[in-house]
Amino acid sequence: KIGFLRRSAPRASAMAVALTCAPSSGAMVEDELMYRTASRGDKHMLRRLHEDWFPIRYNENFYEGLIRGSYDGRPVSHVLATNKEGQVCGCITISTLPSRRCGEDYLIEDAEAFPNVAYIMTVGVKDEYRRRGVGTKLLQWALAAAERDPSIGAVFLHVITYNDAAIEFYRRNGFEYIRTHEHFYHIRGKDYGCHVYAKAMHDATLSRTPRGLLTWLLDALSSLGGSIFSALASSDEQGAERDAVPVVPDSMV
């Protein structure tokens, strides 16, 4: 499973497009796959697929947001991949967030020039359609949507630390590791960490500032019980100007 899952700004225009999926020899997918936006009639199916793909149960507002194009006060764009019978075989959901209030400190260095970032909320492909290029096509759609908006400086996501296949998928598509958050998800009574991956857009620069490195170091040391650095963290927060970071929703993967 490829599964990944944060207000507002100019909306990346929703698209309904048809792209040809070129499957490998002998693949089950032999005909053209259609890529389109969801309608209200897709809501039940989207819920069932997300429950199959992801360990977190999304609330009703999430699925309503997919249909309306707005979730938690922020614009949402999505696309579904369907076969010739109209059955959904994959989908991707992205949102547009302010660069300085996206939940990640200093994700890009050029936030004044690029006030927004795109966030990949969820990606999923049904088992029988994996290794057919469907996930890549969906990701290409998301990147193309971000490319059309000159205010977007990066596309980023969170991926649970044990999802090696997803991590390799994003690396293969040009995403770079930014940092790790421990205890980011709480699933079935257990905490899991996540990695942050991002891809710069429009010649923006992904953050490699001392503040970003310090945040990563403190997170890592905290997971090891590095309480001796607490004074350093306090001093850093008092001496640096920081934008308000929104609370991370509890329904993210």
Image (cartoon, rainbow, N blue to C red):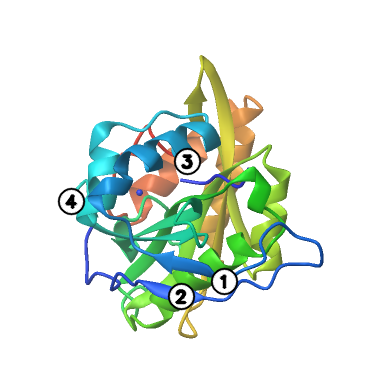
The secondary structure type at the circle numbered 1 is loop
- Of pointers 1 and 3, the one earlier in the residue sequence: 1
Query: Counting residues from the N terminus, which is met first, the one under dot 1 or under dot 4?
Result: 1
Q: For the residues marked 3 and 2, what is the alpha-carbon distance in whole angstroms?
A: 50 Å
Give the residue pinned by disc 1: 32
- Kindly state the secondary structure of the residue where label 3 is placed: helix
What's the residue at 45%, 78% (across, down)?
A: 144
Structural distance between the alpha carbons of marks 3 and 4: 32 Å
Residue at numbered disc 2 = 18
Question: With 196 as the anchor, is 77 left or right in this view?
Answer: left
Q: Is residue 33 above or below residue 166?
A: below
Of pointers 1 and 2, the one earlier in the residue sequence: 2
Which label number is shown at residue 233? 3
Between the residue at mark 1 and the residue at mark 3, the CA separation in whole angstroms equals 54 Å
Residue 224: x %, y % from top left: 66, 27
- Of all residues, the one furthest to the front in this rendering is 85
SS of the residue under disc 4: loop
The CA distance from mark 1 to mark 2 is 8 Å
Residue 91 is at least partly visible in this image: yes
Q: Compared with residue 2, is residue 151 higher up or lower down, i.e. above or below?
A: below
Q: Which residue is mark 4?
A: 73
- The single residue placed furthest to the top in the displayed view is 189
Quick one: label 1, few (<14), some, or many (20+) residues within 10 Å?
A: some
Residue 226 at x, y = what percent? 62, 29
Disc 1 vs disc 4: which is toward the camera?
A: 1
Which callout, 3 or 2, points at the residue further toward the start of the chain?
A: 2
